[in-house]
Image (cartoon, helix red, strand yellow):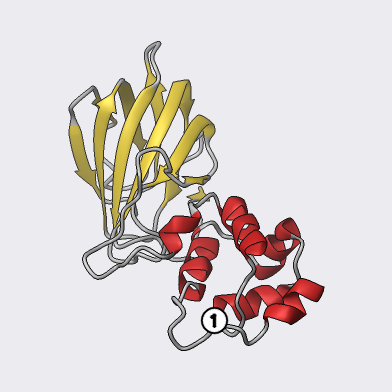
Amino acid sequence: MANELATEGASGVDAPRIGPRLKAARQAQRLTLDDLAASCGITKGYLSKIERDHASASVATLVRICAALNIPVGSLFESSAAGEVVRADNYPPISFGGERMAEFLLTPFGERRIQSLLSRIEPGGGSGSETYELPVDVAFVYVVSGRIRISFNGPGAGEDVSLATGDAFTFSPQLPHSFRALGDDTATVLWILAPALPDDVRPTAR
């Protein structure tokens, strides 16, 4: 608490505005202010002030916040005039559920026009047996390695689609669908959604 009081109002007019980036990173991971504050050992009110650039975080506090969000501290200070970089060794991990898989966000936190995800799906793993829908216009899938099957059901769903290394597929994610890895190797899959998923929406099982 002493550190919080000491840093309130410390941000000057020329200080980098990191608050909105922290907020975007938190919201992209579906964390509440309470969730993140508790994991960092600070108060909800202090975190809220940091996100609004009404208070400057100490180095130690900023490091803890970035660690909790799985983002590099340096990413908060990179210029976004020409774009933002997500480094190959710092893909932010995310989770939309599923089985025996890991997912990473490739587009910057806060990007709303498009969203790119990388999935590494172990053999037999995937989204699960139930289908789900996503409230976006289009999904593009590219299989970097391995094989997957995308299954559909419901009116107008069409046939299931099997994809191997190098295959690409574009479809409407508003159709009930599911996916799983085929074969004995881990599948690496690039997903691109347009526009990005809303902050308050998770894939919903149907």
Identified at 46% across, 47% down, the residue is 92
Query: Residue 114 in the image: x percent, y percent?
Result: 28, 59
Which residue, given by chain and number where applicable, does mark 1 sit on? 53
Residue at 52% of width from left, 37% of height from top?
Answer: 98
Q: Is residue 45 visible?
A: no
- Residue 194 location in percent, x, y? 27, 59
Under mark 1, the amino acid is Asp
The x, y position of residue 108, in whole percent, is 36, 58
Q: Is residue 139 left or right of residue 8?
A: left
In the rendered view, would you say 129 is above or below 55? above
- Check disc 1 and report its element: helix, strand or loop: loop
Choose between 30 and 9: the one closer to the eye. Answer: 9
Which residue is found at the position 26% from the left and 30% from the top? Answer: 143
76 in relation to 11, above or below: above
Q: Quadrant of the N terminus?
A: bottom right
Q: Residue furthest top?
A: 184
Residue 78 x/y as whole percent: 36, 63
Q: Is residue 124 visible?
A: yes
Residue at 49 percent of width and 62 percent of height: 25
The image shows a total of numbered marks equal to 1
Q: Name the image quarter holding residue 88.
A: top left
Q: 24 above or below 177? A: below
Mark 1: give few (<14), some (14-19) or many (20+) Cα within 10 Å: many
